[in-house]
Amino acid sequence: MMRDPIRRYLGLLSALMLALMTSGAAGEQVVAHLSQTQVSITTDFEGSEIMILGAVRREAAIPEEPLEIVVTLMGPITPVTIRKRERTAGVWVNGPAVRIDAAPSLYAVASTRPLLDVLSHTENLRHRIGLEEVIRLIDAPDWLLEERGAYREAVMRLRRDQGLYFTVDDGVSLLEETLFFTSIPLPADLVEGDYRARVFLLRDKAVIDSFEAEVAVQIVGIERLIRMLATESPAVYGVLSVVVALLAGWGGSALFRWLVP
Amino acid sequence: MNVYLPIAQVSVDAIGLLAIGSGVGVLSGLFGVGGGFLMTPLLILIGIPPAVAVATGTNQIAAASFSGLLAHLRRRTVDIKMGCVMLFGGIIGSAGGVRLFAWLREIGQLELVVGLCYVVFLGAIGALMLQESLRALLSVRRGTPKRRMRHTWIHGLPFRMRFRQSNLYISVIPPALVGALVGLLAAIMGVGGGFIMVPAMIYLLGMATTVVVGTSLFQILFVAAFTTLAHAITNQTVDLMLALLLIVGGVLGAQIGARFGQRLRAEQLRILLALIVLGVCVVLGVDLVSTPDEMFVIDPNDA
């Protein structure tokens, strides 16, 4: 009578052990919360930051290999045209254009340790985590074949210099292999659109779970009005610009004549 | 204090923009020029995309020239008939210029062409102005009278018309051509074109000097207004937020400059202006020929 529950218990344990052994640390899941999922660009916008707080949910004991966290934030993906300067008749002229098919307007990577130390190459490729994996040049023209890498790297370098692409190797702090926190700064020159935040949980250089959330970046207030009018009814916008200019010109001289007769 | 520019999609220092606006305004009040030739390069320098700098510059010029034109209308120093003839050419030139601008932008050579135009025109005008004002300064000392233009090839052209206020009876072709050239430059360089029009009116057309500035402001106002409209429709590069800040600064600066200008001697002023023009020309020229640190450029229109 007493043997049954023990057998059942042992059976459950071995099943769990088996499950753990076959799927590694499959039991671990990431839960995360973003401090803001809507960023408003106002007139006096001077940049912002997105804080990401998360936790690792697990049923079993903490595995032995250290847990690593990688967080990425990616701006809207658009094609980019890049040109190499060439000297023609003493003057630096822009050479032929190369279209990089996809380059995010912003890309930030924060991790617990340097990215390549915590992530294997295949996993990086599969999940497109590193910046090199995000920027794509699909159809390179024939003349470019040898130099295509240089163009891609130039896009990365230029955007990095502008503060739009950045990596923070120790940007994620992890507590007791369970709680983690990171803060990703947003530059002042932010482009409107949908941004994507991703959190990856890694053990043994492999992704074991991930989390995704969208951040909507929107221009608001008078700027929004100006932008909408300019793109949706450019003729009205043009007339408005001229009228504003004329009023300001007239107002300015009238004001000064009144102030200093 | 930073301000986010909705069309340029960059965040810039508002105080810096006001300073540029009023600094250029002071110069324009001082010298009676629009100052677009300084404004556009300065805007590009602080990180505004060239396409936005040029188009928005024309909007600021509309404001500045309207302010100046009102003063000249009150003094009745505007030859409206001559202004209309030049404007006719100006609109055609500007319409062509905006098209050219859109095309250059597409092939990625806009910055280069804008830069080259600046170097060529500023260099030529600056050198001419310097030479002319030095000569004038010397002749004032010696007391030689100024030589009025006599008969040239211009007087042999057809379609002659009487311009009472300019004290002229000439063909409409040269003023319309001058207007067209200025319209073209306004669209591509984001300038009013006073620095070309005023010398052309005096030395080429031989207009009475009293109406030269007022008439050129008349033409500049309408060409700038038309160019702003055309850029807004064709290229969508007019940034109203940027324009407002520049206009506010410019209007203030122009009034200050006009008051200072009355205390300085005209010939010395012109030498100073010539030196400023040449200075901008050299800075831009060096930029075109010196080896850049970064060999690659991202097309600013995509960003």
Image: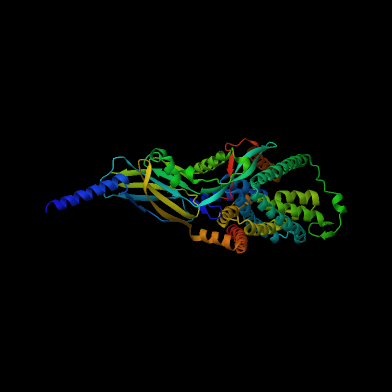
Instruction: Give whichever of A36, A199 is nearer the camera.
Output: A199
Instruction: Give whichever of A248, A243 is nearer the camera.
Output: A243
Task: Give the quadrant of the C terminus of chain A.
Answer: bottom right
Instruction: Give whichever of A99, B19 is nearer the camera.
Output: A99
- Indicate left or right for B90 with A220 as reference: right
- Indicate left or right for B180 with B61 as reference: right
Task: Give the quadrant of the N terminus of chain A.
Answer: bottom left
Which residue is farthest left? A1
Count how many numbered circles sit on residues in the image.
Answer: 0
Looking at the picture, how far across and down is residue A65, in whole percent?
31, 40
Looking at the picture, how far across and down is residue B21, in whole percent?
58, 50
Looking at the picture, how far across and down is residue B170, in whole percent?
84, 56
Q: Residue at x 63, y 59 (%)?
A: B233
Protein image colouring:
rainbow
Examine the rendering and report whether any part of residue B211 can be seen.
yes
Q: Residue at x 53, y 49 (%)?
A: A102
Examine the rendering and report whether any part of residue B263 can be seen.
no
Q: Is residue A161 above or below residue B51?
A: above
Q: Image quarter for residue B232?
A: bottom right
Looking at the picture, how far across and down is residue A109, in whole percent?
43, 44
Instruction: Give whichever of B237, B86 is nearer the camera.
Output: B237
